[in-house]
Amino acid sequence: MTETLAQNPAELVPYGGVEADAAWFDEVRRLASERDAVLLAHNYQVPEVQEVADHVGDSLALSRIAAESAASTIVFCGVHFMAETAKILSPGKRVLIPDARAGCSLAESITAEQLRAWKAEHPGAVVVSYVNTTAEVKAETDICCTSSNAVEVVRSIPAETDVLFCPDQFLGAHVKRETGRENLYVWAGECHVHAGINGQELAQRAAANPDADLYIHPECGCATSALYLAGDGAVPSEQVKILSTGDMVKQARQSSAEEVLVATEVGMLHQLRKAAPEIDFQAVNDRASCRYMKMITPAALLRALREGVDEVHVDAGVAESARESVRRMVSIGQPGGGE
Ligand code: SF4
């Protein structure tokens, strides 16, 4: 597989020196057509990459589009595990990520080796992994889940069977609370961006904007606080919505709210404002920007199309096992789109 090279996003220097002007836009579109490539962009990408892409969405929706597309090449503007998932679901296609260093602190918080050791401590347990995991971890997993169907996936497992949930502790806490399940063990991983959106900040913003709806991604450190605020009556419970990124866009389209506070990566605001321009969307924490996602610069995208890099490879045996856990995820409930 293509290696993700860096653990510390602060040390990464993205490809630069290219302005995202009209000439860039036309050249990207021309090369995509010449290379028979479909351009996919995650909701957290910079606005110009979202605008030049053929499709914008959440990780699972994009992987499905990739599998159904007639194009022979997929250019996945997102982070590495997302491009890998597209490769797992489309083994016959060429999958490129414009910068293979675009990792994910959450996916890197558990390795296949660590998961194997954890499984050995809990023989007979069923492993449920969030989609933000490497192909190798998916291959060790029984059922993958998204934030939309994590609760249903866990409920589908017999009550007496132990469940190992990884890698996100906040999503795991949400599932444990919803299912009331004592035999659910949660891995202590987290995304540095979502964990940085804290409950205190959310409470302050909610108090200052009492009429605003709250859209909370369940990976956020503030998800528990949001439910507490609702339970406490500080914010009416109908104003608190725990949503995957794909479901945030759907909710925005049907909302009559005038103001919405959004607790997730700030790139999400671009799609929300496009979906419902009449709503005032504000970030709970406007510093919540993922450096890995922002590695996919206009220069990196141009490089990918010109040079045919960075290609994503997944070992065939790993891909087959991983595909099975992803297939189970898709068959349970409404999988939505994950991150
Ligand atoms: S926002 Fe967090 S979970 Fe998403 S890609 Fe970045 S590091 Fe990973």
Image: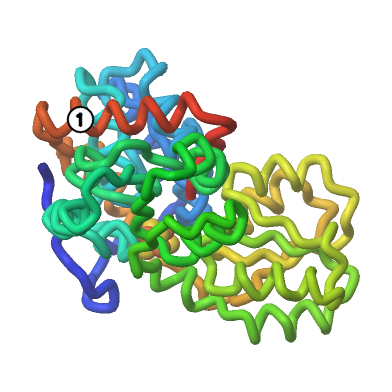
Residue in front for this viewpoint, 173 or 8 = 173
Q: How crowded is mark 1: few (under 14 residues within 10 Å), some or many (20 or more)?
A: some
Q: Position of residue 277 (x, y in %)?
A: 79, 51
Q: Where is residue 189 in the image (x, y as percent from the top left)?
A: 34, 67
User: Which image quadrant shows ligand 1?
Assistant: bottom left
Q: Which residue is drawn at 32% across and 32% down?
A: 325
The residue identified by callout 1 is 321
Figure disc tally? 1
Does any portion of residue 201 appear in the rendered image? yes
Does any portion of residue 293 appear in the rendered image? no
Residue in front for this viewpoint, 38 or 24 = 38
Instruction: Residue 126: name its quadrant.
Output: top left
In the displayed structure, 207 sits above or below 31; it is below
In the image, farthest residue toward the top: 70
Q: Horizontally, is 57 left or right of 283 in the view?
A: left
Q: Horizontally, is 295 left or right of 139 in the view?
A: right
Q: What secondary structure is found at the residue carrying circle 1?
A: helix
In the image, farthest residue toward the front: 160
Instruction: Residue 183: name its quadrant.
Output: bottom left
Q: Residue at x 30, y 20 (%)?
A: 36
Q: Report the amino acid beneath label 1.
A: Ser
Q: Residue at x 48, y 59 (%)?
A: 182
